[in-house]
Amino acid sequence: MTKKITDKKIALVAGGLDLPFFTRDALRAHGWDVYVIGFKHFYDPKLNPDLVVSLGGCGRGHRALQKRGIHKLVFVGALGHINLSDIWPDFWSLSVLLSVIKNQRGYDSMAVALNKELEKRGYEIVAAQDLPPEITLEKPGIKTKKKPSKSDIADIERAIQVSHTIGREDIGASVVVDKQVFAVEAAEGTARMLERVIEMRKKRKKNSGVFAKMTKPHQDLRIDIPAIGVDTVKAVARAHLRGIIVNAKTCFVVDRENVIKTADKLKIFIQAI
């Protein structure tokens, strides 16, 4: 039997882009009392957060949450280029940061170490996708009118294999396969990887190949899980690819209805596995 959640207070800690909006609204629609904290220089001002803090000034956020009796945290949204002034730590943040640095060996292990340190300080880190399920593709299957062909299936299998390989090494979450591995994501992120693919394939006449954005093996799914949105679908179409592969339940789909509608319009398939 699923344990009933009685404490419905939660702090949404927001970076940039649209995901914080959809997560906030979905949580509230499910009866959550959401206190929004925006990271300075990253959050969208239209989000109108209850509190703004710098990455290094989280002691102020900690005090605000303690005052309100909030012990659940959910992290969503992108962090772009970070300036040193953004991470100059206050005492509370410094104590967390030192422990994180001591216990991390890569990007994913840093997230695990951060979660552990926050838990030591009395917080429960909640995976956003476990609360309002409509922000992901909840079940495996093809979600669009367009279906994969036999040749697509071979590319899909290869893309999944390569995604797991680079994920185990904490390199990236995204890969493009068109019979051969065309591109893998590294430090530049998914959007810039797709821009590279668009440039390389701009003279193509026929669409082929797939884009996969997969959860990394052993990834802590409470912070920074993969996400796609309408811009992802448009970039895949511009790259002359045929489809998108993501994980069911563990990939954010920002504005899911519009994502699928756009994919149908551009004749791109989306498959959750």
Image: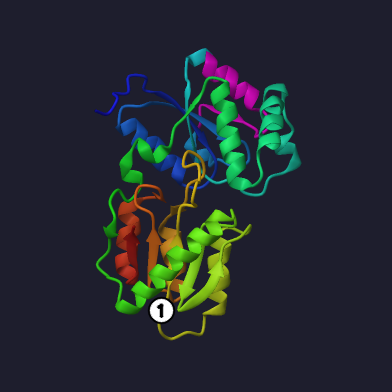
- Looking at the picture, tell me which residue is in the foreground, 223 or 113: 113
The quadrant of the picture occupied by the N terminus is top left
Asked where in the image residue 60 lies, by quadrant, the reply is top right
The x, y position of residue 240, in whole percent, is 44, 76
The x, y position of residue 126, in whole percent, is 44, 32
Relative horizontal placement of residue 183, taking residue 221 as reference (left or right)? right
Q: At 30% across and 31% down in the image, what residue appears?
A: 30
The x, y position of residue 208, in whole percent, is 41, 79
User: On the image, numbered disc 1 is attached to which residue?
Assistant: 208
- Looking at the picture, tell me which residue is in the foreground, 40 or 188: 188
The residues colored magenta run 49-66
Can residue 79 be spotted in the picture?
A: no
Relative horizontal placement of residue 268, taking residue 205 as reference (left or right)? left
Q: Tell me if residue 64 is in the magenta stretch.
A: yes
Amino acid carrying mark 1 in the image:
Ser
Can residue 11 be spotted in the picture?
A: yes
Q: At 72% across and 25% down in the image, what residue appears?
A: 90
The x, y position of residue 209, in whole percent, is 42, 75
Relative horizontal placement of residue 108, taking residue 91 as reference (left or right)? left
Coloration of the structure image: rainbow
Q: In this view, does 15 lie above or below 62?
A: below
